[in-house]
């Protein structure tokens, strides 16, 4: 069925309700289903049981509300989740979708027009407690899977900003190998890549500062099944939870601070110079958190740091090429092979970033609104940066002069007629080197008198900047996290029949985009979703098995009394 053009706009057919909404007499339209054949991309309805299980509508009555109108919060959240799962990566692209076809998926005549959708998102994120909703969901996800919440993976992802409305600080973007304007999102995931929450930093003071100030305090409150004080006293090697992060977080001082809180850290070691003897390495069976099993050649030593005083385990993996990868950890409780499996599962988070950029558009802007920085953040003092730049510039010049001076000294034979020129040039270089050394010492002394970091509020006006409004981004990021976790849930069901995760994900994406027939049966209290055939008989069998598993959930479509029943259209 195709969208029809009516007097009230494209695909609008519920005239009385829309008139009531326009005069403020309707508190949301009910979900009503009529028989519809060949509904475009209605296969995405197979995601609804998992969306609800992963919390799409959980707590929404507590944190969200809308003024009277045609669209309810539940309908909008389902629309946004379906939009994410259908790989419609931005609000602008919704403009080019069939509004009536998407409307049928939620029991309405059509979804909101893009301008209306943006307005609703702004209202929900600005006044509806999107941040608190996200925090509540993250805590619930951890409580529902406490074993996976025991070891948490933290990594930063730079979201590049190409606009001109705000002059954001530059930062290094590894994937671009450039310094670009943007913000850094620190994602907290489990060992298989499922996200819990994200912390956005427009003014990035580094991974360690974000861990100390934003992430660890929250995790101490939210991570379930933490060891009690009595247990920690009785067992000196157990910990509350573990944090896995990249080499940026290498700091014995930070390890000590975290272990004082009984938090274990896992990272790669910096400044590795010594090569261990190959005789120290043994073949070990390594079981990764996702269930995969591998073999690694591992060795271990204890390392004692005097400042601060702390013992740290150093574990090395020997590759076939002879390269030794050094891991350090304050996990004193687990075996070497388990620690190796934990650390080398960081690839799951890197794969998560790549997948989310490609399929969910996590780098895209939600809107173009900007706001003042209200948090008491520290930034680099512009005066300190300028003085530091002068020192680095003079050091570079000094290095060149020293190299030239050393080259002159190493010359063995000099023609007699050039001796005077040689002595003069040597004297000139020596004077320049002495003068540069004095300048550098003077400027260094000047730098010592300047605070490296100052509060943002103390910045000179010409250096202050505004930032992108993040409440809308946080709201949509939470929707996308729910969508990703939902997709993963369906992939895990299919993994019982399909060996490769990539193949299972590809099939799930195909299912979402497949057309289906929607046949409601009010007497039986059923909404029958008959998904059209896939590209081959094998995929049809996988789809049928997925339908059977989902039917066992006996999911009721939100806002109705209709139980979802899934099936594959028979030939």
Image: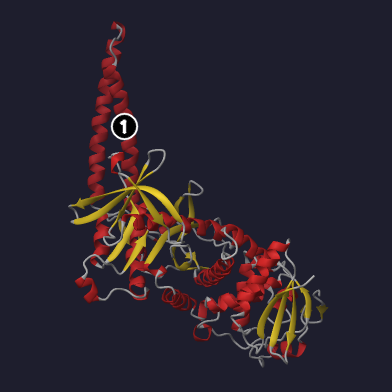
For the N terminus, the quadrant is bottom right
Relative to 554, residue 180 above or below: above
Q: Nearer the viewer, residue 432 or 86?
A: 86
Q: In the image, is 531 to the left or to the right of 270? A: right
x and y percentages locating residue 131 in the rendered image: 46, 75
Of helix, strand and loop, which one carries label 1? helix
Instruction: Identify the image quadrant of residue 219.
Output: bottom left
Looking at the image, which residue sits at the far top? 416
Q: Nearer the viewer, residue 159 or 553?
A: 553
Q: Which residue is mark 1?
A: 399
Q: Is residue 381 visible?
A: no
Instruction: Identify the image quadrant of residue 94.
Output: bottom right
Relative to 316, residue 46 above or below: below
Q: Residue at x 60, y 73 (%)?
A: 81
x and y percentages locating residue 121 in the rendered image: 58, 75
Q: Residue at x 60, y 64 (%)?
A: 497
For the C terminus, the quadrant is bottom right
Q: Nearer the viewer, residue 456 or 127?
A: 127
Q: How is the image coloured?
A: secondary structure
Q: In the image, is 227 to the left or to the right of 501? A: left
Relative to 547, residue 93 above or below: above
Q: Is residue 436 visible?
A: yes
Relative to 142, residue 188 above or below: above
Q: Pointer 1: residues within 10 angstroms few (<14), some, or many (20+)?
A: few
x and y percentages locating residue 294 in the rendered image: 43, 52
- Report the label total: 1
x and y percentages locating residue 265 in the rendered image: 31, 60
């Amino acid at each position: 069925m195709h969208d029809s053009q009516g007097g009230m706009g494209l695909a609008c057919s519920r005239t009385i309700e829309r008139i009531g909404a326009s005069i403020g007499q309707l508190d949301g339209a009910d979900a009503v289903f009529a028989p519809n054949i060949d509904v475009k991309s209605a296969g995405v309805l197979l995601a609804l049981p998992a969306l609800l299980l992963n919390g799409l509508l959980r707590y929404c009555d507590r944190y969200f509300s809308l003024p009277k109108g045609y669209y309810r919060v539940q309908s909008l959240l389902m629309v946004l989740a379906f939009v994410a799962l259908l790989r419609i990566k931005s609000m602008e692209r919704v403009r080019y979708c069939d509004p009536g076809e998407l409307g049928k998926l939620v029991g309405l005549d059509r979804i909101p027009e893009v301008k209306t959708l943006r307005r609703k998102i702004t209202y929900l994120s600005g006044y509806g407690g999107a941040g608190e909703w996200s925090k509540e969901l993250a805590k619930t996800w951890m409580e529902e899977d406490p074993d996976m919440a025991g070891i948490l993976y933290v990594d930063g992802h730079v979201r590049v900003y190409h606009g001109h409305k705000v002059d954001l600080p530059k930062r290094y973007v590894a994937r671009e190998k450039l310094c670009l304007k943007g913000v850094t999102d620190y994602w907290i995931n489990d060992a298989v890549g499922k996200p819990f929450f994200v912390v956005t930093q427009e003014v990035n003071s580094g991974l360690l500062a974000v861990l100390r100030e934003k992430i660890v305090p929250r995790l101490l409150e939210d991570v379930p099944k933490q060891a009690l004080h009595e247990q920690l006293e009785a067992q000196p090697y157990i910990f509350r939870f573990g944090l896995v992060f990249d080499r940026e977080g290498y700091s014995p001082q930070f390890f000590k601070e975290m272990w004082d809180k009984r938090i274990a850290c896992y990272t790669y070691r910096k400044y590795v110079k010594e090569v261990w003897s190959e005789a120290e390495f043994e073949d070990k069976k390594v079981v990764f958190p996702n269930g995969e099993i591998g073999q690694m050649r591992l060795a271990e030593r204890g390392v004692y740091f005097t400042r601060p005083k702390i013992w740290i385990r150093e574990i090395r993996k020997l590759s076939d090429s002879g390269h030794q990868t050094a891991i350090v950890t304050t996990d004193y409780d687990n075996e070497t092979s388990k620690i190796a499996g934990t650390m080398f599962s960081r690839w799951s988070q890197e794969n998560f970033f790549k997948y989310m950029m490609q399929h969910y558009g996590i780098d895209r802007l939600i809107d173009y609104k900007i706001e003042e920085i209200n948090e008491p953040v520290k930034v680099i003092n512009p005066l300190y940066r300028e003085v530091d730049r002068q020192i680095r510039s003079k050091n570079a010049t000094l290095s060149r002069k020293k190299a030239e001076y050393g080259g002159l000294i190493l010359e063995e034979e000099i023609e007699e007629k050039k001796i005077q020129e040689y002595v003069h040039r040597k004297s000139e270089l020596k004077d320049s080197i002495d003068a540069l050394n004095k300048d550098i010492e003077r400027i260094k002394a000047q730098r010592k008198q300047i605070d490296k970091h100052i509060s943002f509020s103390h910045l000179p006006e010409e250096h202050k900047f505004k930032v992108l409004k993040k409440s809308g981004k946080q709201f949509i990021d939470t929707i996308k996290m729910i969508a990703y976790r939902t997709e993963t849930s369906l992939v895990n069901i299919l993994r019982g029949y399909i060996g490769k995760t990539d193949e299972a994900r590809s099939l799930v994406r195909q299912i979402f985009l497949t057309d289906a027939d929607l046949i409601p049966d009010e007497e039986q209290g059923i909404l029958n979703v008959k998904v059209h055939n896939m590209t081959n008989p094998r995929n049809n069998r996988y789809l049928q098995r997925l339908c059977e598993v989902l039917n066992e959930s006996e999911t009721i479509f939100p806002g109705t009394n209709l139980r979802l029943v899934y099936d594959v259209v028979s030939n």
